Image: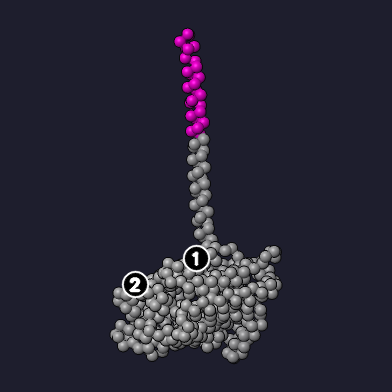
Amino acid sequence: MISLAKNLPELHYTTIKITLFKRSDRLNRQTLNQNIMDSGSRKTDKLATFKFIVRAFRYRNYRLFFGGQGVSLIGTWMQQIGMSWLVYRLTGSAFLLGLIGFTGQVPTFAFTSFAGVFADRIERRKLLLITQVSAMIQAFILAFLTLTGTIAIWHLIVLSIFLGLINALDVPARQSFVVDMVESKEDLGNAIALNSFMFNSARLLGPSIAGLLIGIVGEGVCFLINGISFLAIIIALLAMKIPKQKIKSKHAPIIQGLKDGYAYAFGFPPIRYIILLLGLVSFMGMPYIVLMPIFAKDILHGGPHTLGFLMGATGIGALAGAAFLASRKSVLGLGRIIVIASNIFGLGLIAFSFSRHIQLSLCMMFLTGFGMIMQMASSNTILQTIVTEDKRGRIMSFYAMAFMGMAPFGSLAAGSLASRIGAPATLMLSGIACIIGSLLFLTKLPLIRRIVKPIYIQMGILREMPSEFQ
């Protein structure tokens, strides 16, 4: 008894330790379970976020298009870089760089509005199959002439014009084709943003691959790879199951259809101002691409790999911009984004024109790509959302005229101006013009908001007017 009494304090202390240990163990298990649940919740949230960003992939036709077009675009960018380098290697002329850019894109300005009428009257998939096969033939001819050493500047001009004619028909059909692949208009903006992501993924990979291949095996291999890459999109188009396109006014005269499209586009202020800003940015800003070989070789003292890195940096910036747009829940606010993006694009060009260091130049190209794709894709999304279905092809042809059709005139002007005042000064003026244009567009936003509001309410996109719509 005495021994037991002596040991009571020790037993009591041991009991407390056991009790505390059990409580601690229980708390640890609860904490562990909670951490596991939180970790699982975070993984689920991340998966849900990813699924939301790529929600257009729910549609089989869009998945096929995304995969096939993605492969084809890598080849397209390889050819574009290869042709620019080939022209500058053969001639050393900034003017001829601008001239090739002009001849390759001016058909888009001249003929794409007529192509828009056809996109509203003929099955768009058939048009796309025709354009992709034709572009593949052009790439193989270019590869053959280059690899056999018989290529000349006049060949490049003729083939550029031929490809420009193909693109004049392809662009409005391809832009309008998005709505045929994505059944719900709520996912239309996401699909357009993913298209931009795909386009700029190719912009990142294509020039980088081309820069390496040009230094090793020459430009001809880039053209050959581009020709082969068209098989991916051709197979994807053939595998799609597309609902029959509703055709209106099929037998109306083409000129009348074109007049109706012009009257609708330029009589409707939201479409008019978006297209005008696109045209200005394209004319003044986009020619930076044709001047890139000059910056890579003469200003940054690099080679084809430097050109590839510069274009790759633009692609990374564009990828970031496209990913941001894909993550947005609604088209609301895109008008404001157009203004911000145009300013970023202009400032990026101005800063790049002053840079003489490759690291700084790459950073500025990142900003330029980011602003460019944000402005382009936001404009595309608004246009596709507010346009009436029977005029979609024509409106997208005007979009193509503004974005791509004005670029050749800008390329020609930039090449001529760069030969007089230098590429850096030319690019600085381009950036200033883009900023001025965006500020003018900003003054029209209140009018655009008032007109677009009832359209969005009717579509169910807008139920209650936010205090800061667009």
State the quadrant of the C terminus: bottom right
Q: Nearer the viewer, residue 18 or 220?
A: 220
| Amino acid beneath label 2 | Leu
Q: Quadrant of residue 185?
A: bottom right
> What residue is pinned by disc 2?
212
* Helix, strand or loop: magenta stretch: helix
Q: Are marks 1 and 2 in contact (CB under 8 Å)?
A: no
The x and y percentages for residue 198 are 47, 70
What residue is rendered at 55% in x and 85% in y? 113
> Which x, y percent locates residue 25?
48, 33
**Residue nearest the observer in this picture, 364 or 115:** 364
Say which amino acid is labelled 1: Ala
Residue at 48%, 69% in the rendered image? 364
Horizontal and vertical percent position of residue 66:
46, 70
Secondary structure found at label 2:
helix
Residue 225 vertical position relative to residue 58 in the rendered view, above or below:
below
Report, in whole angstroms, how far the alpha carbon at label 1 lies from the one at label 2: 24 Å
Q: Using the rendered image of the protein, determine whether residue 356 is visible from the camera's viewpoint.
A: yes
Q: Is residue 4 magenta?
A: yes
Q: Which mark is residue 149?
A: none
Say which residue appears at 33% left-offset and 84% top-offset: 146
Q: Quadrant of residue 231?
A: bottom left
Name above or below for residue 98 compared with residue 326: below
* Residue 386 higher or lower than 169, as above or below: above
Binning the other alpha carbons within 10 Å of mark 2 as few (below 14), some (14 to 19) or many (20 upward) gives: some
| Magenta stretch in the rendered image | 1-26
Residue 56 appears in the rendering: no
Q: Is residue 108 left or right of residue 228?
A: right
Dot 1 crowding, Cα within 10 Å, few <14, some 14–19, many 20+: many
Q: Which mark is residue 320?
A: 1
Between 4 and 122, the one lying in front of the other is 4
Residue plotted at (60% across, 65% down): 330
